[in-house]
Amino acid sequence: MGKGAALVSDQERLAWLRLIRTDNVGPVTFRQLLGRFGSAEAALDALPGLLKRAGTQPRISTRMQAEDELAGLQRFGAHLVLSCDPDYPPHLGFIAGAPPVLTLAGGANLDWRRTVGMVGARNASSAGVKMTRLLATDLGARGYTIVSGLARGIDAAAHRASLQTGTVAVLAGGFDQIYPDENIPLAHDILDHGGALLTEMPLGWEPRARDFPRRNRLVSGLSLGIVVVEAAKRSGSLITARLALEQNRDVFAVPGSPLDPRAEGGNALIQQGAKLITNAEDIIESLGSADPSRQALFDRQWEPGPDEVGAGSDVPDPSDADRLRGLLSTAPMEVDELLRQTGLSAAAMQMLLLELDLAGEIEWSSGQLVAKRYR
């Protein structure tokens, strides 16, 4: 995957970075702002007014901060990839909440379409590491790129086994905050062998507990399917498997001894319908027809249709915001149902949801469902 031709100006690229780095602007909010105002620059111009209406004052990323981040990325040999760029990882475009901006180092010659994610226990057994090595080596020999999260145990084994054939490490923090420290040399090896490091987090971002599930959604989103080698009953690997199912990816699991706690999660996945595998051929056979572009599970993220923008008043009253707050709960709700119950125009609903989102009061699920943020 080369850099490809830029589809937006350098000025607009800088604006994309500023907008996604602004407090309370996540992927869904970002897309809503672009859809409403037409460009990131226009959205940034409109933000102060939106924030004033929302009664909040989150930090808006400055031009200097964005320029500093770009300069820092260059020092790491990394660059920005926007979701509109030709070199944006192809499978990511078919997941809900796809990151509008990624930072990427390396990977120019990887096959980003033939990808398999591999995850598992950090305290992996010797047998688990051996199985990971065999699977990753055989998949690489058949032309598949291995994707994982650079964690200890199974992740690290998968990366090491696919150094020669191609691997992608998805980071939970910034390029300068690789976790765990012991895998920093492995990260350098990945780049030295033509692999890639990828993250949606800014430079200086030290990963927190909540950032690992976010990383996991990218591991599964980049992949045609996910292989779970070893996983305890409650583990990040099972979160990745659940996310993969939500993204309509294949989930594979290596069976293990019922006496080993590290096998409980994988065995449970098999009981629930994951494909039992014993070799790479089992995976390759299943992935032959995998195509996220045809099988995308999620609906498009909600936004008013072209004929709805401007229909009715798109500047809601404060009482409308209070009424909407009263209807929302921590249980996700369809926006169309909120429209029916409030009687608001789609444009006015979009404005209210933007304001509540910027104030940190709501969160999105699957792009179509909205809920009150649990505090």
Image (tube, rainbow, N blue to C red):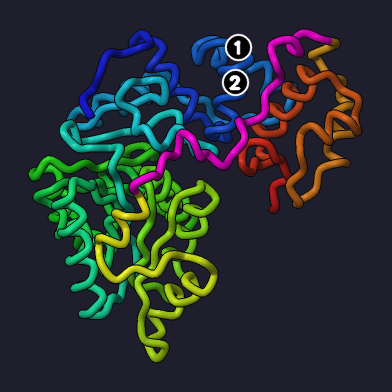
Give the number of the disc on residue 341. Answer: none
Residue appearing at x 81%, y 9% in the figure: 311
The disc labelled 1 sits on which kind of residue?
Phe
Residue appearing at x 21%, y 41% in the figure: 196
Residue appearing at x 52%, y 25% in the figure: 60
Residue that label 1 marks = 37
Above or below, comparing residue 4 to residue 357 in the picture: above
Q: Which of 322 and 234 lies nearest the eye of the viewer?
A: 234
Give yes or no for contact between labels 2 and 1 (Cβ–Cβ under 8 Å). yes
Above or below, comparing residue 200 to residue 116 in the picture: above
Give the main secondary structure of the magenta stretch.
Answer: loop
Residue 240 in picture, x, y percent from top left: 45, 58
Q: Is residue 149 visible?
A: no
Give the number of the disc on residue 33. Answer: 2
Tag 1 secondary structure: helix
Specify the segment rendered in magenta.
Answer: 288-311
Residue 239 in picture, x, y percent from top left: 49, 61
Q: Which of 158 and 256 lies nearest the eye of the viewer?
A: 256
Q: Is residue 58 left or right of residue 125?
A: right
Label 1: few (<14), some (14–19) or many (≥20) C-alpha neighbours in 10 Å: some
Q: Is residue 107 left or right of residue 354?
A: left
**Residue 143 colored magenta?**
no
**Residue 292 colored magenta?**
yes
Q: CA distance from mark 2 to mark 1?
A: 6 Å
Q: Which of 266 and 30 lies nearest the eye of the viewer?
A: 266
